[in-house]
Amino acid sequence: MINRPRRLRNSDSLRSIVRETILNKEDLVYPVFVKDGQGVKEAISSMPGQYRFSVDTLKTECEEVVKLGIKSILIFGLASHKDDTGTESHNPNGAVQNAIRMIKKDFPDVVVMTDVCVCGYTNHGHCGIVHDDYVQNDETLKVLQNMALSHAEAGADIVAPSAMMDGQVAAIREILDKNSFQRVSIMAYSAKYYSACYGPFREAADSAPQFGNRATYQMDIGNTREAMKEIDIDIAEGADIVMVKPAMLYMDIIAKAKERSLVPMAAYNVSGEYAMIKAAAANGWIDEKRVMMEMLLSLKRAGTDLIITYFAKDAAAEIEKLKD
Ligand code: PBG
Ligand code: ZN
């Protein structure tokens, strides 16, 4: 007798009832870039379809995002003034803080997440305070605390520390709790690798390091066990959600992490991963929508609960189409 798995592939309906993994709009987190000013909507050349917004134009964007059924947004800020210590990162009237207040007022059902890192705010472009050409861990924790607190005060639901400083989750949990923000969650960029795939983002956020690189704080790309260690530490420090970044190239890490931890798993489908698909599609070499949906579904299949992706709007539109 021939064993016949093909029997369950005979029609759309049959395939749909035995499908193991389905991508939902709730799985998608939409990253946005915000800066001071009015009427700003600047295209980011290495990320086709992505823009830098001012708060007013972000409002129009949010209307679209909500209409598409996306539930959560991750906000990144661009600085108007950079200095040694990234002071603007915790300005209560900074672009990010203003954007948070706008969204919570006009779109109260949207879950607002914020990136907590100073590389966009420091004149040297590193993710922390630099002395002697070295990013100083414990001194940086204080700035990250101030930044996270200012986001919580503006109304953020989830703060997401991405600086890869040791102790950043505990430090942020402590300052939030001390200021009665027990309700604010922490999504930790736990296993954030020293990847070559962040290039377009650094153009978008103007956050490239001006000397050296990020190898002394981001994770070595060869390491799996170290990622598990970072995740365990962050959960012990109070992370509510942990993240692997990048996503597509690190699905083995996502799958392993999902097996060992009980908190929701996020993956960051980063700018370089977005740009690769966009560039190939623009050349007519791949079917953009199908590759996009396959990649996102694969991330979910690997164990991702939340996918941070610049494709969020397009994916939500595709999911809607599938309903017909
Ligand atoms: C800031 C930060 C970066 C990204 C998210 N937060 C850049 C970096 O570490 O240089 C990258 C996101 C992307 O590439 O889409 N620490
Ligand atoms: Zn950074």
Image: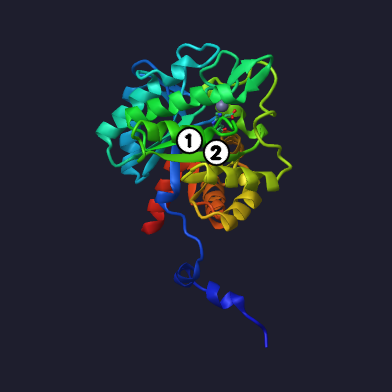
The three-letter code of the residue at mark 2 reads Tyr
* Residue at the image point whose x is 67% and y is 84% from the top: 2
Task: Locate residue 129 relative to residue 173 in the image: left or right.
Answer: right
Q: Residue furthest right?
A: 222
Q: Secondary structure at mark 1?
A: strand
- What's the distance in space between the residues labelled 2 and 1, CA to CA? 7 Å
Residue sitting farthest toward the bottom: 1
Is 75 in front, or is 272? 75
The residue at 44%/46% (across/down) is 28
Q: Could you tell me if residue 99 is visible in this image?
A: yes
Q: Quadrant of ligand 2?
A: top right
Circle number at residue 189: 2
Residue 160 is tagged as: 1
Measuring from the top left, give residue 49's x and y in whole percent: 47, 32
Along the line of sight, which residue is nearer the eye, 9 or 234? 234
Q: Answer whether residue 267 is visible to the viewer in this image.
A: no
Please state which amino acid type lies under the numbered disc 1: Ala
Total marks in image: 2
On screen, 118 above or below 282? Answer: above
Establish whether ligand 1 lies closer than 8 Å to the Cβ of label 2: yes
Instruction: Classify 262 as above or below 107.
Output: below
Q: Quadrant of residue 174?
A: top left
Q: Does residue 21 appear left or right of residue 158 in this picture?
A: right
In which quadrant is the N terminus drawn?
A: bottom right
Quarter that holds the C terminus = bottom left
Residue projecting furthest to the front:
178
Give the image location of residue 153, x and y in percent. 34, 28
Q: Are there few (<14), some (14-19), or many (20+) residues within 10 Å of tag 2?
A: many
Circles 2 and 1: CB atoms closer than 8 Å: yes
Q: Position of residue 179 (x, y in %)?
A: 35, 30
User: In terms of sequence position, does the residue under pointer 2 or pointer 1 come before the other?
Assistant: 1
